[in-house]
Image (tube, rainbow, N blue to C red):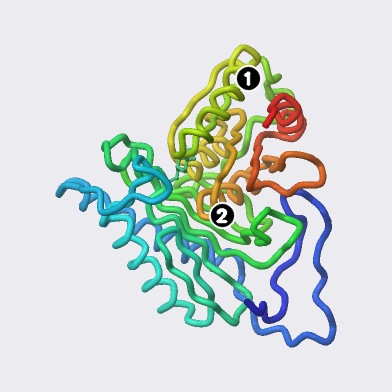
Amino acid sequence: MAEAGSVPTGSSPTDTGDTAPRGDVAIPPQPEPQELAELAAGCAEEVGKRIRTMREEGVRVAATKSSITDVVTAADREAERLLVEALTRARPEDGVLGEEGAGVIGTSGITWVLDPIDGTVNYLYDIPAYAVSVAATVADPDAFADGRRAIAGAVYNPRTGELFHAWHEGGAYLNGTPIRVVDGAERPSLAHALVGTGFGYTAERRKEQASVVAELLPQVRDIRRIGAASYDLCLLAAGRLDAYYERGLQPWDYAAGAHIAHEAGARLLGRDADTPPGEPLLVAAAPGLAEELRATIVI
Ligand code: LIP
């Protein structure tokens, strides 16, 4: 997709350098990242309340994807439709990429990356750990494995009413209150760290992931498998997890949550110093602890 012009630059989560705008490229007027964050937050909250109502009315599996346990519900599809409708009405020149198939090529340089219900299995079982994830992203080949970087994002858990949002160099917020990762003198060692993670949907991948977590478990305080990457990353941003890692995430799983964690002071790492976070591995924690955790994970 042609990315017209450049948008606010700044240190990417991996601090691999900025992409300065070129003098010969026409740069369309760009929105303030805070405006995008507020649009993302409004859409995530409105659609989140809709899917909560749909859950209360009853949910059924509409289809499966990568395996019989990788489910999609009618609510996933409806939530994505509502998000696309709201975002393209507000910003018709933007692109869209959604987990359930939404794909719009934009001309503004901004692409919305959407997970309409992150934690779909939790949603199906009515476990209060699922979220609507909305990220405004720009092209940046060095930031994440998918070649995009969020400059604004929102994650909303409709069961708890927790609305996380952040924007480029603007900080991270939970229901309007600033949040930060546990860092500095408070930062725990790996042995005292509460570490979030998750598992894929295929038996082969789960077997590999089980061996990784079996090695890690005796080296950390404890493990939490909450079931929604975007929410895991927001709990890290709020200091309710000390670290998070997962293998095989999709861009819509991490786009908003990783941005919120980064704006809250987390470092986002890939499998090694030459690989950006995302697929095959994303590690997130306060600086120092992120590197210590990555060194311990063998994938
Ligand atoms: C989920 C991720 C989670 C992972 C789950 C699942 P989904 O996304 O957010 O981190 O462990 O297996 O992939 O499928 O609920 O959108």
Q: Is residue 184 left or right of residue 133?
A: right
Bin the neighbour count of mark 2 within 10 Å (Cα to Cα): few under 14, some 14-19, many 20 and up.
many
Residue drawn 40% across the image and 52% down it: 132
Mark 2 residue element: helix
For ligand 1, tell me if the residue under mark 1 lies within 8 Å.
Answer: no
Residue farthest to the front?
204
Mark 1 residue element: helix
| Of the pair 144 and 257, the residue shown nearer to us | 144
| Of the pair 235 and 180, the residue shown nearer to us | 235
Question: What's under tag 1, amino acid-wise?
Answer: Leu
Quadrant that contains the C terminus: top right
Above or below, 111 relative to 176: below
Q: Position of residue 226 (x, y in %)?
A: 44, 32
Quadrant that contains the N terminus: bottom right
Give the residue at mark 2.
251
Residue 123 occupies which quadrant of the picture? top left
Q: Position of residue 167 (x, y in %)?
A: 60, 58
Q: Is residue 273 left or right of residue 200?
A: right
- Taking the image in four quarters, ligand 1 sits in the one at top left
Above or below, 224 relative to 73: above
What is the count of numbered marks? Answer: 2
Residue 109, numbered circle: none
Question: What's under tag 2, amino acid-wise?
Answer: Pro
Residue drawn 34% across the image and 38% down it: 122
Q: Position of residue 255 (x, y in %)?
A: 57, 54
Give the residue at mark 1.
216
Residue drawn 38% across the image and 37% down it: 129
For ligand 1, tell me if the residue under mark 2 lies within 8 Å.
Answer: no
Residue drawn 65% across the image and 82% down it: 29
Residue farthest to the left?
57
| Of the pair 200 and 193, the residue shown nearer to us | 200
Give the CA distance from mark 2 to mark 1: 25 Å
